[in-house]
Every structure is written in structure tokens, then in C-alpha cells.
């Protein structure tokens, strides 16, 4: 009786529910496209507002195009498309993008050692077409004094950071820039981070060990050989890929 009831329910209501799910899924896709368009329009309006509100630089001719200098900072360890998108968005808020790369020591002190050293991370950032200039050895935690140094030394108009909060010891790292009206935010690229990428690599390495052990069970030489290859060079290979 239960089986018959389920069959009747599926015949009478199953197709209707599937059609309803398809309609809702299509409506969701349309809504997501609309949200994307609105976000682009809002961001373009922000760009226009920045262009209009930034004063003309001293000693610059009114006939010359106005240069708006943007500063961003970060660790940029294991560069990925989220970093590239941040550079793209930051550069779109001005005409010249300066990127500060956090030093190995400051990163290690605040969150543990990076996978790539100063020189490697600097080289990757310099290679991005959206970046005009790179500042080495930036502190991981921005201070008011350091931001003042950046404003004065590099003639920066605005400091830019992702829209996720940046709070250290209960204080907003960019509070001083915000008080001066020289802070702008950009949307964070969802779905990717260095931590998540490292997690993927660790899982892939674990699965590789498991498969190799299963294939090489009973062959101690083959099993040991496989472990030495993966343990010694697997990390570098995974990062390179």
C-alpha cells in the first residue's frame, strides 16, 4: 500500500514539482544576472564619483588628464584570480595602481610563514598588467604612521581594500584613511583564497598516497619509492601546477 501511494503521489505531483523547481532555478539565474548588472553600475558610479571629487594635483596643467593614484596592500601568497580581480578593480578606481607587498617577517608574525618568499611574491605582483608600481616590505598591519608615509612618499590619493572588515585588536586598520576621506572599498572575489587552495593541495596529496598504497600493497620497494617522490617534491609540483 505504501509503494502504491508513493507511485500515485509521484505521478500526480512529481512532474509538477520538477517544473516548479526549473522555473525557480531560471528565476534565480535571471535575478543573479540582474544583481551583477546592478553591481557593475554601482561600481561605475563610484568610479565617476572618485574622478569628480579628486582635486587637481599641484603643478599639473589643467589640459593634462588627471592622475589618480591608488594604493593597495596584501600578502599575495600563491597568486590567484581573486588577487588579479582585486588589482583590476583597484586600478579601475584611478589611473595608477601602487601595490604594497607584506614582508615575510610581518606575515609570519601575524599569521604564520607564507608559502612563497618576498622575492617570489614581489615578482608575481609585478607581472600583473594592472599594477604600475610595487612597494616592498610593507607591514602586514597598516598603522596610521605608515599610511601617512604612503600618502606623502607615493603621492597616493586613495587607499583601497576589500569590503571584508580589517579589524586588529578591536581597531579598524584603515580608520585614519577613512577619517581623511581617502579610503575606498572593492568587492571581495568569492570562492577563492590562498588558504582554500592550500587545502585542495593537501587533500590531493593525501588521496595520491592512498591510491599508491593500494596499488603497491605487498611491494615495499614500490610503496617507499612513491612516498619519497610525493613527500619530497609533491608540494613544489602542486604549487607550480
Image (cartoon, rainbow, N blue to C red):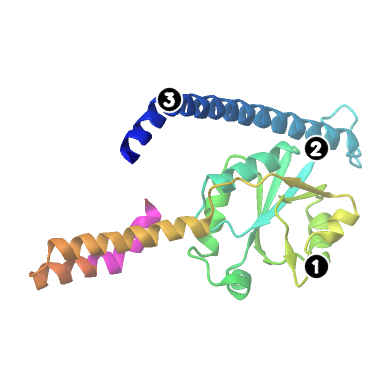
The residue positioned 91% from the left and 40% from the top of the image is 59
State the residue in front, 224 or 132.
224
First in sequence, mark 3 or 1: give its number.
3
First in sequence, mark 2 or 1: give its number.
2
First in sequence, mark 3 or 2: give its number.
3
83 on left or right of 196:
right
Kind of element beneath mark 1: strand
Q: Are dots 3 and 1 in contact, CB under 8 Å?
A: no
Q: Residues within 10 Å of mark 2 (few under 14, many from 20)?
A: some
Residue under numbered circle 1: 171
The residue positioned 43% from the left and 29% from the top of the image is 14
Q: Which residue is at the far left?
A: 218
Separation of disc 3 and disc 1 at Cα? 59 Å
In the image, is residue 79 above or below residue 109?
above
Residue 172, x across and y down, in percent: 79, 63
State the residue in front, 30 or 142.
30
Instruction: Residue 87: give its label.
Output: none
Residue under numbered circle 3: 12
Residue numbers of the magenta segment: 229-240
The residue positioned 72% from the left and 60% from the top of the image is 166
Residue 147, x across and y down, in percent: 80, 60
Separation of disc 2 and disc 1 at Cα? 31 Å
Q: Which picture quadrant has residue 100?
A: bottom right
Residue under numbered circle 2: 67
Amino acid at each position: 500500500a505504501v509503494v502504491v501511494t508513493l507511485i500515485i503521489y509521484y505521478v500526480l505531483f512529481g512532474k509538477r514539482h520538477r517544473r516548479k523547481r526549473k522555473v525557480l532555478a531560471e528565476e534565480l539565474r535571471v535575478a543573479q544576472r540582474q544583481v551583477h548588472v546592478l553591481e557593475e553600475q554601482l561600481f561605475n558610479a563610484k568610479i565617476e564619483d572618485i574622478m569628480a571629487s579628486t582635486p587637481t594635483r599641484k603643478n599639473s596643467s589643467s589640459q593634462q588628464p588627471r592622475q589618480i593614484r591608488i594604493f593597495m596592500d596584501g600578502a599575495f601568497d600563491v597568486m590567484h584570480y581573486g588577487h588579479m580581480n582585486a588589482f583590476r578593480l583597484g586600478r579601475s578606481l584611478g589611473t595608477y595602481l601602487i601595490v604594497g607587498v607584506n614582508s615575510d617577517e610581518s606575515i609570519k608574525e601575524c599569521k604564520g610563514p607564507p608559502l612563497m618568499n618576498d622575492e617570489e611574491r614581489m615578482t608575481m605582483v609585478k607581472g600583473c598588467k594592472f599594477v604600475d608600481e610595487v612597494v616592498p616590505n610593507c607591514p602586514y598591519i597598516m598603522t596610521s604612521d605608515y599610511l601617512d608615509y604612503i600618502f606623502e612618499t607615493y603621492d597616493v590619493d586613495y587607499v583601497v581594500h576589500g569590503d571584508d572588515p580589517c579589524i586588529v585588536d578591536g581597531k579598524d586598520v584603515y580608520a585614519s584613511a577613512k577619517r581623511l576621506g581617502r579610503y575606498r572599498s572593492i568587492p571581495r572575489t568569492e570562492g577563492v583564497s590562498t588558504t582554500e587552495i592550500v587545502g585542495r593541495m593537501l587533500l590531493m596529496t593525501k588521496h595520491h598516497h592512498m591510491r599508491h598504497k593500494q596499488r603497491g600493497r605487498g611491494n615495499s620497494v614500490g610503496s617507499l619509492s612513491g612516498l619519497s617522490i610525493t613527500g619530497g617534491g609533491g608540494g613544489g609540483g602542486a604549487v607550480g601546477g
